[in-house]
Image: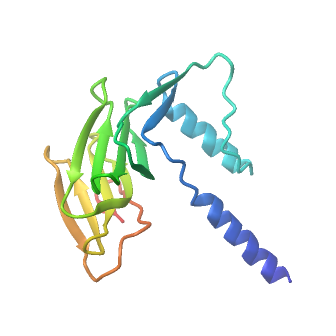
Amino acid sequence: QISCRLTCSFILLLLFSLVIIPIKLHVVLANDNLFELRQHRERNVKQGSMSDTLDISSSTTWVTTTVDSTENILGANSIAMDAADKAHISYFDNTNEVLKYATNASGTWVKTTVDSRGDVGSYNSIALDTAGKAHISYYDNTNVDLKYATNAGGAWVTTTVDSSGYVGSYNSIALDTAGKAHI
């Protein structure tokens, strides 16, 4: 009975941790600072609250920005903040079946297609290096492979990481202190 409770608790915790809040590529900024929202969310989770409701003071101004108005943007999106608190988003454009990237690092939103070879990007994760360059791991649905893309050299470069078949969905990426990707 205790084992069942622990297993059920673990499963519920896992399900809550896998919740993806779709951006629909509308980014909500609080005082132009997403980092403030992320810190607040982490604080709520650490205190045991699983609520997605953010308790922001009444003095905070909410701004909604449409980043991409493509009709069918799925909830498989990932966001990272650079040192200047600018957003970098990797996302799947289901209408065109491509992996896209958007950032407001220049002061305005700039969108780029990262990979358009087949049905790619349905699962993706983004991390930034110390120079603010993007590193994205993602799923290639056409070839059922795990792929990686980066703009660290200036232009986007894509690489197949694992082509052993049916690998790469629900992936996650992190960079170590040397800027090396771990997926």
Q: Residue at x 20, y 48 (%)?
A: 151
Q: Is residue 159 left or right of residue 108?
A: left
Residue 45 in the image: x percent, y percent? 67, 49
Which of the 4 image quadrants contains residue 125?
bottom left
- The residue depicted at 41 percent of the width and 31 percent of the height is 66
- Tell me the quadrant of the picture where the C terminus can be found: bottom left
Asked if residue 82 can be seen in this view, the reply is no
> Along the horizontal axis of the image, is 148 left or right of 26?
left
**In terms of depth relative to the viewer, which is nearer, 140 or 41?**
140
The one nearer the camera, 120 or 61, is 120
Q: Residue at horizontal 35%, vertical 56%? A: 175
Identify the residue at the far top of this view.
Answer: 59
Residue 177 point in image, percent of width and height: 34, 53
- How many numbered dots are placed on residues in this image? 0
The answer to whether residue 81 is visible is yes
Viewer-side residue, 23 vs 161: 23
Residue 117 at x, y percent in the picture: 18, 61
Q: Quadrant of the N terminus?
A: bottom right
Q: Position of residue 95 (x, y in %)?
A: 32, 52
Q: Is residue 71 above or below residue 176?
A: above
- In the image, what residue occupies the spot 21% across and 55% down? 115
Q: Is residue 108 left or right of residue 64?
A: left
Q: Coloring scheme of the render?
A: rainbow
Rendering quarter of residue 161: bottom left
